Image (spheres, rainbow, N blue to C red):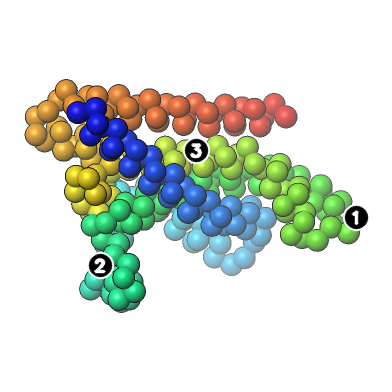
Amino acid sequence: MFSEAWQITLFSLTVAAGSTLLILPFGIALSWLLARKEWPFKSILETLVLLPLVMPPVATGLILLKFFSRRSPLGRWLYELGVEVIFDWKGVLLAMAVMSFPLLVRSARISFSEVNPRLEQIAATLGASKLRVFFTLTLPLAAKGIVAGALLAFSRAVGEFGATILVAGNIPGRTQTLSLAIFNRVQLGNDEEAYALLGITVVLAFGAVWVSEWLVKAKKTI
């Protein structure tokens, strides 16, 4: 039991960390755009980004299944390149990334909004390029909020269930995460193992959320 629980936990943490790293550059770029720029129909993009937060995870999983199955143009193209997404660990990665992306964007966007634009203007008047201003001023000032959002996204990824089970299935040793393993143990009537895995999940989620909240409070005291 211990060995199996460790393998499931390690797999969940590894893929969740991978999904967080995958969405980080896209989340930072989009958050900055949403915080600093205005354009027509901006609210539509904002709504689309946040949809996975309010839609049933199973519905999001069904959309991903539609787009990445072998019957779809994208899925067929990826399969011809030797990339199998559905019922593979890559499907777990995809589901986690999509479901956790809105949490990163929300937190990072708020952080970028709280950076005083006047500081950026002063840096620009001193001859700093836009890229230099972003990487040496804006990004460091928003860093705590971005890290807090990344931790929330990581925590959400670890607990992801609905989209994952549709896109990747529940294959022991291949796509089974902590959430899927808990579901499987409950179905089999193995409550002892289910509660043990639940305890691991709670500890991981509590740690990530606690650190995230600590970073948010630390940012406010600056």
Considering depth in this image, is 125 or 11 the residue closer to the camera?
Answer: 11
Identity of the residue drawn at 29% across and 65% down: 84
Q: Based on the displayed image, in which of its 4 quarters is residue 143 positioned? A: top right
Classed neighbour count for the residue bearing mark 2: other residues with Cα under 10 Å, few (<14), some (14–19), many (≥20): some
Amino acid residing under circle 3 = Leu
Give the x, y percent position of residue 25.
56, 55
Which image quarter holds the C terminus?
top right
Q: Based on the displayed image, in which of its 4 quarters is residue 217 positioned? A: top right
Q: What is the residue that sits farthest to the left in this orientation?
A: 188
Which image quarter holds the N terminus?
top left
> Distance between the Cα atoms at labels 2 and 3?
30 Å
Q: What element carries label 3?
A: helix
The label on residue 126 is 1
> Distance between the Cα atoms at labels 3 and 1?
35 Å
Give the x, y percent position of residue 188.
9, 34
Q: What element carries label 2?
A: loop
Classed neighbour count for the residue bearing mark 1: other residues with Cα under 10 Å, few (<14), some (14–19), many (≥20): few
* Left or right: 67, with 204 as reference point: left
The label on residue 151 is 3
74 shown above or below 93 = below
